[in-house]
Amino acid sequence: MKKIEIKSAKFVISNSDIAKCPQDGKPEYAFIGRSNVGKSSLINMLTKRNKLAMTSSMPGKTLLINHFVVNDEWYLVDLPGYGYAKRSKSQTEALEHIISSYILDRERMTLLFVLVDSRHEPQKIDLEFFEWLGENGVPFAIIFTKADKLKKTPLGLNIKAYKERLLEQWEELPPIFITSSETAQGRDEVLQYINSINETL
């Protein structure tokens, strides 16, 4: 496997309005998942920049669309998490609008990476989110996070359970990656996949 080198990764802009997102035409790879799924840690691991995305033990801290430009070639986009229970109804609705407007209306979004905590069996909220993406024809891949927290057998069983649930509704599975921000497992595979898409654009 060809290693993809991250020569540069820098923050560009945060906002809640897709009209204010960068307009330079670079492809965008967006990352989303339930609150506390390890999104910031994964972004930092992929880019090898420890403080590029701010990590927090407090779930639900990402409230805006955050653009980071990588190698001056493509954008890594950090989206707000979904499913954080301790938000007011108005906050939840505002975040849902930000998320859905970006995913459905942002033409430069090339692929959505949906992060799933590998420690858990299939969660209703994740399955419903996959279903919504399917209904709207959104291209996506799944990244299972925190693989270092489980032994190989339970990890495999959880991922198998997700695949089986997805195949109840889908004819074929989306690309699936297994990662750990602690050990950098899956880093090369995710970056290679992004690179392979970029080469076709």
Image (cartoon, rainbow, N blue to C red):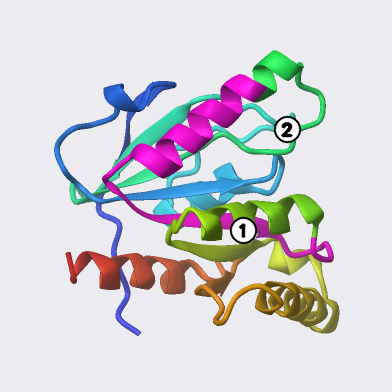
Residue 141 vertical position relative to residue 176 in the rendered view, above or below: above
Amino acid type for the residue under numbered disc 1: Phe
Q: CA distance from mark 1 to mark 2?
A: 21 Å
Which type of secondary structure does the marked residue at label 2 adopt?
loop
Amino acid type for the residue under numbered disc 2: Pro
Q: Nearer the viewer, residue 18 or 50?
A: 18
Q: Position of residue 124 (x, y in %)?
A: 80, 55
- Neighbourhood count class around disc 1 (C-alpha, 10 Å): few under 14, some 14–19, many 20 upward: many
Residue occupying the point 59% across, 30% down: 96
Tell me whether the residue at label 1 lies in contact with that at label 2, contact meaning CB atoms closer than 8 angstroms: no
Left or right: residue 73 compared with residue 106: left
Residue occupying the point 45% across, 54% down: 112
Which type of secondary structure does the marked residue at label 1 adopt?
helix
| Circle 1 residue | 130
Residue 59 disc label = 2
| Mark in the foreground, 1 or 2 | 1
Q: State the extent of the magenta-drawn residues as a range.
A: 93-122
**What is the quadrant of the C terminus in the image?**
bottom left
Query: Can the viewer see residue 60 in this picture?
Result: yes
Q: Position of residue 185 (x, y in %)?
A: 57, 70
Q: Position of residue 7 (x, y in %)?
A: 25, 53
Query: Can the viewer see residue 62 in this picture?
Result: no
Residue 6 vertical position relative to residue 34 in the rendered view, above or below: below
Residue 21, located in which quarter of the rendered image?
top left
Q: Does the magenta segment cover residue 95?
A: yes
